[in-house]
Image (cartoon, helix red, strand yellow):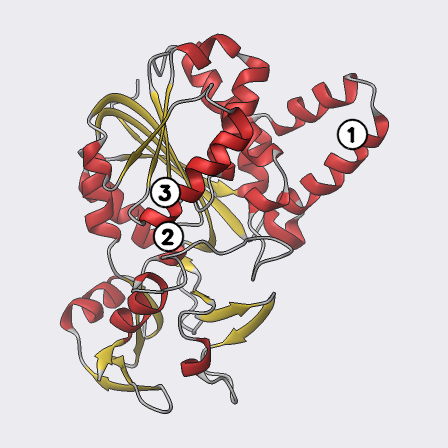
């Protein structure tokens, strides 16, 4: 028997695990993300970052860093918008990805080569502490839901017995997991492991940090299980009758709703200041998405405008991503 968090870690990050090698995202993959929905997601983040530089809150020599980059689409989209709005920054900004899996590093390099040729130098790190820069703007999309989690139910934590059938039972008592759950009055659901160490590691990466992340979840725990599996755009709740975990192990994504109170507490304890917590709809609107769409409309290509507008609706529609996804933004030494 092993704790569920170890089982999930092996599922996602073990040898041959789901995220250890490249997996398609979007129509050809198992699920959609904001990045695969519209390039205006990255463009809006870039527009916001440029505004921080113009306001003097970040330097024009800052490093733009993506964590959890998958193929590298988001960082590439950010760079493409910088080239449109403030091309002079391409000569001063640095661009990097934190990625510990070598196969994904190669995929990211190839994607950047296909988008930019030799024009953009992309630096890779395996750990945020290797960045060691004065100022960084860090973006991470749907990263917190991919941290391994433990499961708790009425004071018991889950273990998995592996064999011909992988079986989840609530038979153990992990004091650390229970302590975190009690902090949020949680008796049932997921308890993420690793937020604290991640926040501490990131805090040491630079003297000045803006960290921006989007994910799905809430600040209040539901006291219910949200853990689920995505395979071919089908959703399989972990405890649904007929779900055979051993057949899905390592071949599909496994995720859960983020407890943003846990994220916020972990970053504050590490030394960060919470700058913003809001819905994706509000965040992208305040970051300047309407301005970008207005700029596109002024180009006069109505077909292009309507096509992109339809894609953007996925990002901001309250019934799709707009309300369910949240932005959390942390600052370190930002005036």
231 vs 291: above or below: below
The residue under the point 18% across, 42% down is 200
35 vs 334: above or below: below
Return the residue found at the far top: 88
Do the residues bearing badges 3 and 2 touch, measured as CB atoms within 8 Å? Answer: no
Q: What element carries label 2?
A: helix
Residue 123 in the image: state x and y as whole percent. Answer: 32, 29
Marks 3 and 2, the one that precedes in the sequence: 3
Q: What element carries label 1?
A: helix
Do the residues bearing badges 3 and 1 touch, measured as CB atoms within 8 Å? Answer: no
Residue 300 in the image: state x and y as whole percent. Answer: 83, 19
Q: Residues within 10 Å of mark 1 (few under 14, many from 20)?
A: some
Q: How crowded is mark 3: few (under 14 residues within 10 Å), some or many (20 or more)?
A: many
Marks 3 and 1, the one that precedes in the sequence: 3
Camera-nearest label, 1 or 2 = 1
Q: Which mark is residue 305?
A: 1
List the residue tagged with mark 2: 144
The answer to whether residue 185 is seen in the rendering is: no
Q: Distance between the residues labelled 1 and 2?
A: 33 Å
Question: Image check: 207 left or right of 100?
Answer: left
Location of residue 307 by image quarter: top right
Who is closer to the viewer here, 127 or 147? 127
């Amino acid at each position: 028997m092993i704790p569920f968090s170890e089982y999930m870690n092996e599922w996602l990050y073990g040898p041959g695990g789901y995220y250890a090698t490249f997996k398609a995202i979007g129509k050809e993959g198992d699920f959609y993300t904001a990045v695969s929905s519209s390039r205006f997601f990255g463009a809006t983040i870039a527009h916001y970052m440029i505004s921080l530089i113009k306001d003097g809150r970040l330097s024009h020599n800052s490093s733009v860093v993506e964590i959890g980059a998958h193929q590298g689409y988001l960082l590439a989209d950010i760079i493409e918008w910088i080239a449109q709005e403030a091309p002079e920054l391409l000569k001063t900004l640095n661009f990097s990805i934190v990625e510990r899996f070598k196969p994904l590093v190669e995929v990211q390099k190839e994607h950047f080569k296909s988008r930019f040729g030799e024009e953009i130098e992309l630096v890779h790190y395996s750990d945020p502490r290797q960045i060691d820069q004065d100022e960084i703007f860090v973006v991470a999309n749907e990263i917190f839901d991919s941290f391994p989690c433990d499961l708790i139910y009425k004071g018991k934590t889950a273990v998995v017995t592996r064999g011909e059938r992988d079986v989840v039972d609530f038979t153990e008592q992990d004091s650390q997991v229970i302590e975190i759950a009690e902090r949020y009055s949680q008796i049932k659901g997921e308890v993420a492991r690793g937020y604290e160490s991640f926040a501490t590691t990131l805090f040491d990466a630079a003297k000045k940090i803006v960290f921006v992340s989007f994910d799905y979840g809430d600040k209040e725990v539901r006291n219910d299980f949200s853990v689920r599996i995505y395979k071919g755009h089908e959703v399989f709740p972990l405890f649904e009758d007929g779900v055979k975990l051993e057949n899905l192990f390592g071949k599909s994504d496994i995720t859960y709703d983020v407890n943003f109170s846990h994220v916020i507490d972990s970053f504050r304890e590490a030394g960060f200041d919470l700058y913003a917590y809001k819905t994706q709809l509000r965040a992208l609107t305040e970051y300047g998405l309407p301005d970008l769409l207005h700029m596109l409309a002024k180009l006069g290509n109505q077909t292009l405008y309507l096509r992109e507008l339809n894609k953007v609706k996925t990002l901001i529609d309250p019934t799709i991503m707009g309300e369910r996804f949240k932005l959390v933004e942390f600052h370190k030494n930002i005036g």
